[in-house]
Image: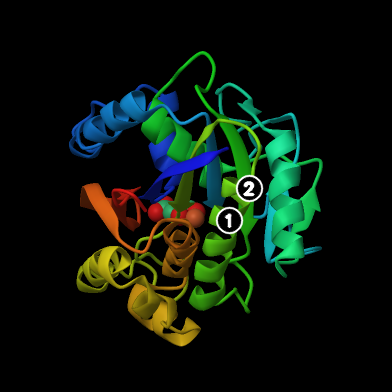
Amino acid sequence: MAKLIAGIGTSHVPSIGAAVDNGKTQTEYWKPLFDQFEPARSWVETVKPDVSIIVYNDHAHAFDLGSIPTFSIGTCESFRSSDEGYGPRPIPDVQGDPRLAWHLIESLVLDQFDITMVNDMTVDHGLTVPLSIMYDQPTNWPCKVIPLAVNVVQYPQPTGRRCYALGQAIRKAIESYDQDITVAIYGTGGLSHQLQGERAGVINEPFDNWFLDKLVTDPLTVAEVDHTTWLRETGSEGIEAVMWLIMRGALSEEVKEVYRFTHCPASNTNYGMTILENAAGQ
Ligand code: DHB
Ligand code: FE
């Protein structure tokens, strides 16, 4: 049977991807951040998940305001990088896992989560930057990827409670999959940032640290944070971090935090990363 082995939380700042693509990772601005990716890269090199479910939000590339699915799963054989205005990123195509994607969709829909099925899509920085953070510039990405896109762009976004429950249902779905593969799940986005409007530039490190602490010990308290609080405390784009609750919900009740750091600023964002493993025997 398939086994969920770990959860990774990471911001998905697009200029991190641009730094990798343009050979700027060792500059004065980026080196202090990229140095802190090294332990995460060593960790992933050791655990080598066969498949990564990447929970991310599309930023008006695969979807626009014409249709906005709350939760959707990509079923394609492979996914090209979106053209975000400067051409698609010069990265390998992301290989999907249609068989597992359809299993997840079936299991989740039968479990009352009405997932939109996406059979033709590109993937933007929300998904590709976390891959670059973990794997740098490989010829081919070393794992298959299932894109799980969440609407955090247009009100009303799903609640934290709903995201956590979806994570729990994903765990159940993985554990009922008939192949001996290992699966990692990523929650991406955040931490605090606001890209436009009067409060552009909002950063709230105390809230972000509270979020990272509670995600480990008491995720249900984070799941109760309402939309207005996310907005007030973390800025209009900080609510992206609600997607980390899907990752956390898929893990065991107790988890072992094997790595964590924050770095401020990374572009407009307080960058955050956490790596969580299921507690022994859970
Ligand atoms: C930035 C962060 C994001 O999450 C995003 O989607 C776009 C831009 C930033 O900090 O620049
Ligand atoms: Fe984003």
Q: Is residue 34 above or below residue 191?
A: above
Q: Amino acid at mark 1?
A: Lys
Q: Amino acid at mark 2?
A: Ser
Q: Is residue 250 above or below residue 207?
A: above
User: Which residue is rendered at x = 75% and y = 40% of the image?
Assistant: 75
**In-front residue for pair 23/10:** 10
User: Which residue is rendered at x = 56% and y = 23% of the image?
Assistant: 90
Q: Residue at label 2?
A: 176
| Element marked by disc 2 | loop
Q: Is residue 92 above or below residue 258?
A: above
**In-front residue for pair 97/190:** 97
Q: In screen coordinates, is 33 left or right of 80?
A: left
Residue pushed farthest front? 281
Q: Would you say the beta carbon of the disc 2 residue lies within 8 angstroms of ligand 2?
A: no
Q: Is residue 100 visible?
A: yes
User: Is disc 2 in contact with disc 1, using a CB cutoff of under 8 Å?
Assistant: yes
Q: Residues within 10 Å of mark 2 (few under 14, many from 20)?
A: some
Residue 53 badge: none
User: Which residue is rendered at x = 53% and y = 63% of the image?
Assistant: 168
Quarter of image, res 232: bottom left
What's the CA distance linking mark 2 and mark 1?
Answer: 6 Å
Q: Residue at label 1?
A: 172
